[in-house]
Each structure stands twice: as C-alpha cells, then as structure tokens.
Image (cartoon, grey):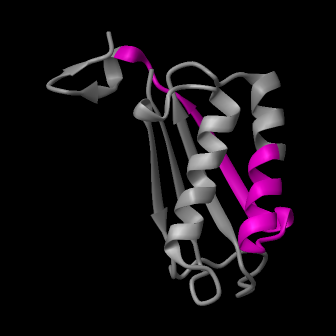
Amino acid sequence: MPECIEFCMNVLEAHPTELAGATAFRCLTHISRKSAAYCMAVVKTGLVIAMSGGSKQPCCYVDFKSIGCIDRMRNQKTSQLFCALINKTLGVPPTSIYITFRDVAREDWGFNMGTFA
C-alpha cells in the first residue's frame, strides 16, 4: 500500500533539495517498513513560511499520507522519528516542525489507472 510524504520548508541555501528528499524517503521507509516501490517523497524548499509569530527561522511542514500506518500510538513515534531526522539532517529544530497524519481510504488513492480498493 502506498505512502506519500511532503516536506515544505523555508530552508534551501545550506541544504540541497536532494538531502531533503533523501531525508523524507528515509522517514517513510523506516517508519512503515513498506516497499520503497510504493513510497513517494515530495520536497518543496525555499518557500515563504512563517511560524512562531512570523519568525524567519528554519521551519518545516510535513504532510504524511498512508493507507494504514496511521493511528494514535504510531503517530507519536512517527512524530519523534520525523523530528529527529529533520533536525539532524536539515537543522530544523523540532519546535519548528508541524506534521499532519492522514489515513487515506483505499478507494481514495489512485494508481496505475485504478485505485487500491
């Protein structure tokens, strides 16, 4: 079953997009243990993103979508993992990272001219 992670960051200069993409992909495959063939990482860097009263400090918004792998217990561990990896590789502090978790129904995810239903 597929998973997609989207990183939106106001960071670009010191960290190439490839590093952010690799970090996103590591987050996906580590937490879900799903085949990389069903994982997608979307990275948007250099965006205008303000957080904490308009501060221009590095920040990141992560949107994590999955069929399965989303529940209260897993989300807590996933948040810890994502924040640690993003902080270590991209230098964004955990206090400047927001993450949304979306469990997508099989019939609501299209692929290869059909859905996963």
Quarter holding the N terminus?
A: top left
The residue that appears at 82% across and 23% down in the rendered structure is: 73
Q: In the displayed structure, would residue 38 be above or below residue 51?
A: above
Q: Residue furthest top?
A: 117
Residue 83 is inside the magenta segment: yes
Q: Report x, y in % for residue 14.
A: 65, 87
Q: In the displayed structure, would residue 43 be above or below residue 63?
A: below
Residue 103 is inside the magenta segment: yes
- In the visual, does 37 lie left or right of 34? left
Out of 28 and 10, give the one closest to the viewer: 28
Out of 76 and 29, give the one closest to the viewer: 29
Q: Report x, y in % for residue 55.
A: 75, 85
Q: In the displayed structure, would residue 95 be above or below residue 55?
A: above
Out of 80 and 95, give the one closest to the viewer: 80
The residue that appears at 77% across and 26% down in the rendered structure is: 74
- In the visual, does 51 lie left or right of 28? right
Quarter holding the C terminus?
A: top left
The residue that appears at 50% across and 79% down in the rendered structure is: 47
Q: Report x, y in % for residue 83.
A: 79, 55
Q: Residue furthest left?
A: 113
Q: Report x, y in % for residue 101.
A: 62, 37
The residue that appears at 52% across and 29% down in the rendered structure is: 66
Look at the image and give the residue range highlighted in magenta.
81-106
Q: Quadrant of residue 68?
A: top right
